[in-house]
Structures are given as C-alpha cells and as structure tokens.
Image: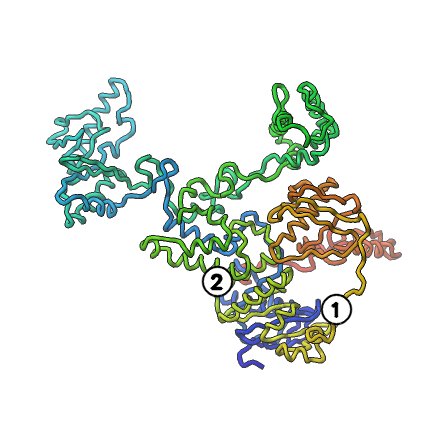
Amino acid sequence: MPKEAIVIQGARVHNLKNVTVEIPLNQLTVVTGVSGSGKSSLAFDTIYAEGQRRYVESLSSYARQFLERMDKPDVDEVQGICPAIAIRQKSPGRNPRSTVATQTEIYDFLRLLFSRVGITICRQCGQEVTRDTPESIADRIINLPLGTKFYVLFPATAGMPNSLRGQKQNSAQENHDRLRIRGHLMSLMQRGFTRYYVSGQLFELDSVDSAPFEKLDDVLVVVDRLIARPDIRSRLVDSLELSYREGHGTAFIHTVGNGQRQWRFSESFECKPCSLKYATPEPRLFSFNSAYGACPTCQGFGNVITLNMDLVIPNKALSLEEGTVDPFTKPQFYWAQEEVLKFCRERGIPTDVPFAELAKEQQRLIMNGSGSYMGIRGFFDHLESKKYKVHVRVFLSKYRGYATCPVCQGARVKAEALDVRVGGKTLPDICAMSISSCAEFFGNLTLSSEQRAIAERLLSEISHRLNVLVEVGLDYLTLDRLSSTLSGGEAQRIQLATNLGASLVGTLYVLDEPSIGLHPRDNNRLIKIVQNLRDIGNTVLVVEHDADMMRAADHIIDLGPGAGETGGQVTFQGSVQDLERSPDSLTGKYLSGQLRIPLPTRRRLPRPGHRLAIRGASANNLKNIDLDIPLGLFVCLTGVSGSGKSTLLYDVIFANLKKQRDEWNRAVGAVKRVEGGKLLDDIIMVDQSPIGRTPRSNPSTYIKAYDGIREAFASTREARARGLTPAHFSFNVPGGRCEPCKGDGTVTIEMQFLA
C-alpha cells in the first residue's frame, strides 16, 4: 500500500458494501468495473462529496450559503482527503452567451488586454485617438527649438452658460449678457488671470471696462508665459494642470515669434482633428454579457429574431397553387392565398410552376409586393400590428428564426468596442480566428516596451491557455464558437483544458468517464492531459472503462463482481499488471485477452433500394458530402472529435427527415436533398441529454410502466370497495401523493446559516 494516500474506510453509499480502499496521492487512479457496480458511488458520492464538504465547511457561514452543499456520505472514516473538483460527463451547456473563449476564461484576459494596451482608432479619419495628459504635453513642448517662447492658455468661455456664447438674441438680452460677460471677466481677474490672447494679440486688463472685446468665443486666457528649455518641465506641467482645471479639460499652447503655431489639447479621450469623443477603454466595454458593452440591438447575442423565409416557404418544389407559402394554407388566411394568386395572374407570374423555378424578380415581387398587393413580408408586418393577441404571437413564432445582427454583424459588442485594436485587430477579429492562429498571433505580437510591461502577465496567461487547447487537439475551434454547438468530446476536453490552465496543485480531480465519445487519436491526447494534471502535483481519480486509460494508470480499483445488489465490492486494487493476472477480476480477464467480445462471423446484407441518400450536405464544417445509409442494418458513424459527426446525424439527417414529415419548425442543416424518408415509420433521436426532467421522475414513470401498476392496484377488490382510482396511486397529483412532501419523498427545510 502507498505511504501517502487518501484512505476510505467503511463506505456504504448506495450499493457499496462497507468498502475500504486507498488512493495514492499525486498519482493517477482509475476506478473501473461493470456498469452499476458502484464506481460513481465511490468516486463522486463518497470521495468527491467528502472532499468538497470539508472544504466548504472551512469557509464562513456567510460564504457557505452561496455554495453547493454536499450531503455527508455514509462512511466510517476518510483520511488525507484534498479539496476536490469534479469534471462530470455531461452534454454541452445551452447558454446562448457561452463561447469557447468565455468558458476557458480567455475572454476575461482579452478584455483586460484591450482595455490596458488597446489603441483606439478614429472611425472617421483613421488616426489614433489619445488623451493628452499634462506630462505627455510637457514632453512634447520642451522638445521645441531651444529658446522658443510660448503661452499656456485655456478658453475664456469655460464655465459660462451656453446662452452667452455668441448666440443671436434680442437687444435686451444682449445687454443682460454683456453684463454677465463682465461678471465672468471680473471673476477671472479675481483669480489672477489678467492676460488674454485675442486674434494674435496679447492684452493685459487693468479693469473689466478696458476689455477690447464684447464676446468671449475666440478669447483665450493666459495661464503662463514660458521659454522652451529642459528645466521648465515641472512648471509647465503645473501650468497645464491649471489650464485643464480652469478650461474644463481643454488647454492651448501658442508659440510666439516667427512661424507662430497653436495646438489644442484635450483631457477628453477624443480625436483632435475630428473633435469626436470616444469611450474610454475599460473591461466592461468589451463584455457582451454587460449592458454597458453589449450591442444594444441584439443584446450581446450576435443575432436577432426575424422572419425566416425557409420556414415561410419550407418546400420550394411546390407551386403557389399547391400551397408553397405555408402560412397561406391555414384556414384563417385563405384570403392571403387568394390575394397572391390574383396578383400573380395580373402580373403574368405562373402559379402552377414550382416556386424554386420562378425568376428571381418574380420571387421578389411575391415576397415584397407591389402596388396594392402587400406581399408576404407585408402580410407579416400586418400581423405584427396585432401581436397583442396571444394566438397571433404564437403564429408568428412558428415562422421566425435567427439572423446575424445587422448592426454589429455578429460581433456582439457595441460599436465603440470595435474602435479599439491590439496588433491591428479588434477583439471580435481575434475571437473569429482559430485557436492555432490565435496562439501564433499572440506569439508574434509586437508591442512597445511600455505596453509589454503592462501586458506581460496578461499575454502569458492568454498564451498558456491557448497552448493547452492546442495540446488537447482543439486547435481548429474558433474562440467565438458557441459552447452549445460543441460535441461531447470537445466539451469534455475544454473542461479539462480549463482546469489544466488554472494550474492548481494539491487538488483532487474526479473525472467521470472522460473518454466517452472520443476517437482513439483524441483518447491519447486525453491521457496526456490527465497525466499533466497529475504531474503538476494533483491527485487524479478517473471513473473509466477504456483500456488505454487503465494501462496508463498508476493504480486501479476494480469494483464488482456484478451490478446493483451483486456489486459494491472491491474485487481488485493495485497495478495494471497485477490486474491482468487477477483471477477474481472480470475487467482483468478482458484486459489480458482471456475474454473477448465475439464479432459476428456473418454480416447482414442491405436490401436493394432500402437506403437513405444524403446529397450535398454542407452544414457547419461538412464539405458538400454525399453518402448512402442502408436501412435495416446497424450503421456506425465515426471519426475524430469535431469532424462533423453530430452535424451530419442531427442537423442534416434527423432535422431534414423530421422536416419532410412536417414535424420540424426550426432551421435545418444545409443539404441539397435527403431521399428515402418515406421508407421510415418514425425517426427517434437518442442523445446524451438527461431523460429525467423532474425530481419525481423514475424509470417506471419514464417507460410508462407505472401507469399499468396504478391501474392494477386500482382494479383490486379492496381499492374498488374504497372507491380508489388510478389517480389515488400517483405521487404526482393531489389525492394520491403525500401532501406534506408533495410527492417528493423528502421535506426541504431552510437552514440558512445553520447549513
């Protein structure tokens, strides 16, 4: 037995029978065994639950109420447990905002990078937008030719109401404003500003009455008079700060003598030639999950719900007379069908020709209308005015789909964020790159020494996470890829890469069958990731059936010998070499080759003509592929992770077959045609989604067996005598269920800080 180990004694969770095991620290341990033997009960419900529970209990009572509370497992003793992290086998998240970049936390570092070292480019003139600080202005001015005389000034209108700045007014108002201008000049003089620069001349006022001007629009107040030389920097900075303060963020420098020049400086973040102000780059400006940074049109989703013509005209092989416009076939809208037919006859548009064969201009007229005919789009605009009615909203929802946001073009952030660039690229540009291209971009990124000092840590974190994603074989993904579109294998590897990128040490990682859905090529990469987690100083516990993962393990625990009541016992624990020689381990016999899964000696032949024909499938990453799938056979679809298996199976085959049966009202995968659907009685998709939707769901209710059980009990003599119906034997409805727990079997008591 190992000297340093997590020791579990007397575990009795679920079907575990007083199990005692030791898991070596800082090693890779695989828990294996037949399905239902208690692997998850040991790894997750005992070891992970205890590790997580102890860590949470070490926190304050205030912090504990926000964290997942784990029940104390039924176990005699657990020694040497580490803080635990579980990576479960689950379907990708359905959050429409989640992307590869946000899930791996790369996006957070990118937002910081752009807010710290990003360069804002004026969208009008293309010049860099800067903020003039007193220090940067001073550095520029002291480099003027030695001995150059100059003034530091600010606009005299600063601090005055807009109504006094040269606007046309009546004579009474002009007299009143003249008095207020005199009052403003007197205030400036009381603060020590007696020199004014007007039209190239310098005036020094002894009194307000001696002012040679009546308006202040072109008047500049002199703060200081200086001569360019190295030792004036401190005084110049002080004068500029005073100018900014008195000039409400605006200052001027005017040189005196031959070749007079004048510069305007602004404390605001603006383009000086265009006088356009820009938002100051900050992390929230680049977040599409923040109301401040998200595109106001699409709310940060990158797409908007709009009319989907593929749903309005689902079958373009039909003619107008045959009802190619789906909403016009509904009884309440027959009038719209009559209108479109009447319009087509007047314009000479054939109504008995498939819609796809009509000329583009004819299709456009039918869509947009002309003259008194409102067209298909006008029809839906008419319905929009009545969407306060529930049935109209329901009807409209059937013909809507998602389209790229016309304002941000899918960038998801507001226009101000698109003005900021790093290395000549905007943040959406970088997120649209593949992970491998992105890693290369940051590896070759050129920054100034000042920018490099600011961004060094950020670039290190970004490059590290990108390199980890490349190592796990996800280099082909883009950072803006939605998490909901990832395959199971891709999602699992991203979870692992995220944890590997965090570089935690001294942690217990518990993984739930990570090799499910992975190609052998990807499986080798997975093993390397798990070994990397171990090598940086973590203990890794994996529930697994894969032979390669078992052979890579430092320690193996085999549970069995059977499932359920016949399982829950340790049949072996030790090295993989000893497992193959163990006479009691069913896993060891398969691993050593003593037992094998028999392959069929004869293969069933396909029936002629019984096939699905897929032609021109081009959804997502599919490259216009053609294939035939024989019906009545066991057909396997395989390929490396991300090769397009799920796209072909779900988006192309399943969705298009359902659409042919009018059982699909969403977008389908792009394909020229799918033939052979009429040979099928039904199409059923069995995916990785959990089957239970409520805590009351169980296997008997899911397969509808419980209906027969309730009817059997209700038909007994005693039940009939008491007037009991099948509903009285249901735990889902009042009358049958236990009312104190509402049929849940448990009562929830809010413990608050006592939890």
Q: Residue at x 27, y 18 (%)?
A: 170
Q: Residue at x 58, y 82 (%)?
A: 1
Where is mark 2, residue-wise? 502
- Circle 2 SS class: helix
- Camera-side residue of 648 and 117: 648
x, y percentage for residue 654? Answer: 70, 47
x, y percentage for residue 561? Answer: 72, 74
**Which amino acid is tagged 1?**
Ile
Q: Is residue 733 visible?
A: no
- Camera-side residue of 285 and 421: 421
Q: Residue at x 14, y 32 (%)?
A: 202
Going from the N terminus, do you reach mark 2 or mark 1 first?
2
Q: Residue at x 27, y 45 (%)?
A: 133
| Res 248 quadrant in image | top left
Q: How many marks?
A: 2
Say left or right for 289 vs 341.
Answer: left
**Which amino acid is tagged 2?**
Ala
Q: Residue reaching furthest right?
A: 717
x, y percentage for residue 385? Answer: 60, 28
Query: How many neighbours does mark 1 have within 10 angstroms: few (below 14), some (14-19), or many (20 or more)?
Result: few
Disc nearest the viewer among 2 and 1: 1
Q: Which dot marks residue 94? A: none
Where is mark 1, residue-wise? 597
Marks 2,1: beta carbons within 8 A? no
- Camera-side residue of 10 and 281: 281
Label 2 to label 1: alpha-carbon separation: 41 Å
Q: Quadrant of the C terminus?
A: bottom right
- Circle 1 SS class: loop
Q: Is residue 223 visible?
A: yes
Say left or right for 247 vs 358.
Answer: left
Say left or right for 612 vs 129.
Answer: right
